[in-house]
Structure formats: C-alpha cells, structure tokens
C-alpha cells in the first residue's frame, strides 16, 4: 500500500538528511513511476550523442552527492561548464588539464588502496554507512576528452588504465564513478571497461552499434535501441540498473537557475563547522594537502 506523508508546515532543509547510501532520484519511467538508483556500490556509464541529456543525469547525481553529508565530490569536466557550478562543493575540480586529471586519479587510487588495507585489518570486505567514511563520488564529463583528445598518447593510456582500476575496485571502497561520453565507440569505451559499469544509460545514439556499446552487446537486436529515441526528446534514455533489463526513462532536468540555487545551498552547508561530516579514519583523502 502506498502512503503519502503530510507536507511539512515549516521550512526544513533537506540537504543534511541525505546520504550517498540512499536511493538517488534520477527521473521517471514510461509509466510515470519514479526511478531511483543506489550508487554507493555501483558505477554508472552514460553515453549518447551531444545534447541527448547526459549532463542532466550527471547534474542530478551531483546534486544528491553535494547535499549528502557523507559524500565528497571529485569532478573532471573538460568543458568546465557542465559540472562547473558544483566546484565550490567539490574537493577537486579538474578542467582541461591532463596532468591534474592524472594526479587526482593517482591520489584516488592510493585512497582506494588505503581503504582496502583498512578493511582487511578489520576483517571486512566493503565500506558501509556505519563506518564513518565518506563516499567519494567521482564524476567524469566526457571520457574521450581525457582518453583520446588532450595530452600525449602515453598520458591518455595512463588515464584509461587509472580509470579502469578505479571502476573495477572502487565500489567496495566507497568510491563510485559516474562517467559520460558523446562518443560511444570501442576505442573510447572498450568492452573491458564498459562491462565494469554496473549501471549504464544510453541516450539517443545514431546507430544500433553505438547503443550496444553503452548497454551491452545484443540489446539493440532485442528491441532496446537508443536509435529509437527522437532527437527532440532530450533526457530520454534506456537505463540498465537494478533489474538488469533496459528501462526507458526520462531523466529529471535541473535548469541552470535551479542548479545554481542547489549548488549555493550545498556549498553553504559544507562550510567548516556547519555540519558534522564523516571523518576518514583511514587518514587518506585531503585534497588540500
């Protein structure tokens, strides 16, 4: 039975009550039902043509992460403007700088190794909400920019290797990765990397092959092809999440004004001393250091 809670009669800030271990609202399905994903132990890959709505999905997740008391944000945005409004809530914001991107991924890899050493010492296999460890949410807008455009070939290959390691091992250490690309091709998203993403969202693609590269081989032939999405239907996507079957969704959209308001509030509640935030007892992640 569905119940509806009464609306609050006084203003109650919602931010301090959120957690990265809570389901994240990302939109509605084709029947108008809300769609949630739980990201703490998953990674998400979003792919599709420019303007399809990938940034809308990333901003929904960034908003939840910024408003969560147990989350720290690491943002990589080659264009600076897609995730730029969340910079004041992030521990690290990387723009078109491959050297800085590699540095932050190396540090995240060390954080991950430290956390696994800590888990092993405590006879554990994964981080939980009771561990007083923050979830370090990593958002990458446009994988191809760092893996195929900027920097030398050696730097690009190192970026892919570091990202693959983080996606492969970071989940249980509380370091989920959300990555997006406008170029869903095998040179940008090799199968060995794509299959590490538990969640995948295919926005409009120009070919069934591109849709399969995001969702997985064979889904287009079974009727789940992102080529069916109309060019004017921005924010529509096929999402593979908890059910394991592609689900047609419409991603929730935050306009620039709404993002600015949420980002400003998130930065305010993250001021030193404003909130009691989890302490990393592993002693591993201080971006300012």
Image (tube, helix red, strand yellow):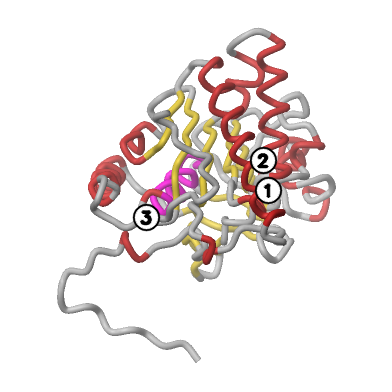
For residue 223, which quarter of the picture? bottom right
Question: Alpha-carbon distance for marks 3 and 2?
Answer: 22 Å
Q: Is residue 124 magenta?
A: no
Q: Is 149 on the left-hand or right-hand side of 279?
A: right
Residue depicted at 48% across the width and 17% down the height:
96
Q: Secondary structure at mark 2?
A: helix
Front residue of this view, candidates 1 and 95: 95
**Local crowd size for mark 1, using a 10 Å CA cut-off: few (<14), some (14–19), many (≥20):** many
The residue pinned by badge 2 equals: 113
Q: Are marks 3 and 2 in contact (CB under 8 Å)?
A: no
Residue depicted at 57% across the width and 61% down the height:
38
Q: Secondary structure at mark 3?
A: loop
User: Mark 3 or mark 1: which comes first in sequence?
Assistant: 1
User: Mark 3 or mark 2: which comes first in sequence?
Assistant: 2
Q: Residue 12: where, in percent of width, then height?
A: 22, 69
The residue lying furthest to the bottom in this view is 1
Q: Residue 85: where, in percent of width, then height?
A: 33, 35
Q: Residue 212: where, in percent of width, then height?
A: 77, 42
Question: Alpha-carbon distance for marks 3 and 1?
Answer: 21 Å
Front residue of this view, candidates 170 and 228: 170
Q: Is 194 on the left-hand or right-hand side of 77?
A: right
Question: Alpha-carbon distance for marks 2 and 1?
Answer: 5 Å
The residue pinned by badge 1 equals: 116
The residue pinned by badge 3 equals: 277
Q: Which is the main secondary structure of the residues drawn in magenta?
A: helix
In the rendered image of this protein, does residue 104 appear above or below residue 192? Answer: above
Front residue of this view, candidates 124 and 182: 124
Q: Residue 181: where, in percent of width, then height?
A: 60, 32
Q: Are marks 2 and 1 in contact (CB under 8 Å)?
A: yes
Q: Which residues are magenta?
A: 53-65
């Amino acid at each position: 039975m569905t119940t509806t809670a009464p609306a609050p009669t006084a203003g109650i800030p919602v931010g301090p009550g959120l957690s990265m271990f809570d389901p994240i609202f990302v939109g509605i399905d084709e029947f108008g039902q809300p769609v949630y994903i739980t990201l703490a132990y998953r990674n998400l890959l979003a792919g599709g043509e420019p303007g399809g709505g990938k940034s809308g999905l990333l901003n929904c997740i960034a908003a939840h992460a910024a408003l969560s008391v147990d989350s720290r944000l690491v943002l990589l945005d080659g264009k600076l403007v897609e995730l730029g409004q969340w910079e004041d809530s992030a521990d690290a914001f990387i723009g078109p700088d491959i050297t800085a991107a590699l540095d932050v991924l190396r540090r995240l890899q060390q954080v991950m190794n430290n956390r696994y050493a800590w888990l092993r010492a405590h006879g554990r296999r994964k981080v939980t909400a009771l561990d007083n460890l923050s979830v370090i949410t990593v958002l990458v807008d446009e994988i191809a920019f760092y893996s195929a455009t900027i920097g030398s070939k050696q730097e690009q290959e190192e970026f892919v290797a570091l990202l693959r390691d983080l996606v492969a091992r970071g989940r249980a250490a509380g370091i989920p990765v959300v990555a997006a690309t406008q170029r869903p091709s095998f040179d940008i998203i090799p199968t060995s990397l794509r299959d590490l993403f538990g969640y995948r969202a295919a926005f409009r693609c120009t070919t069934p092959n591109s849709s399969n590269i995001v969702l997985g081989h064979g889904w287009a032939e079974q009727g789940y092809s992102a080529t069916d999405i109309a060019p004017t239907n921005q924010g529509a996507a096929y999402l593979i999440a908890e059910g394991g079957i592609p689900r047609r969704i419409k991603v929730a959209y935050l306009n620039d004004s709404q993002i600015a308001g949420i980002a400003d509030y998130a930065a305010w509640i993250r001021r030193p001393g404003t909130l009691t935030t989890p302490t990393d007892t592993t002693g591993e992640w201080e971006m300012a250091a």
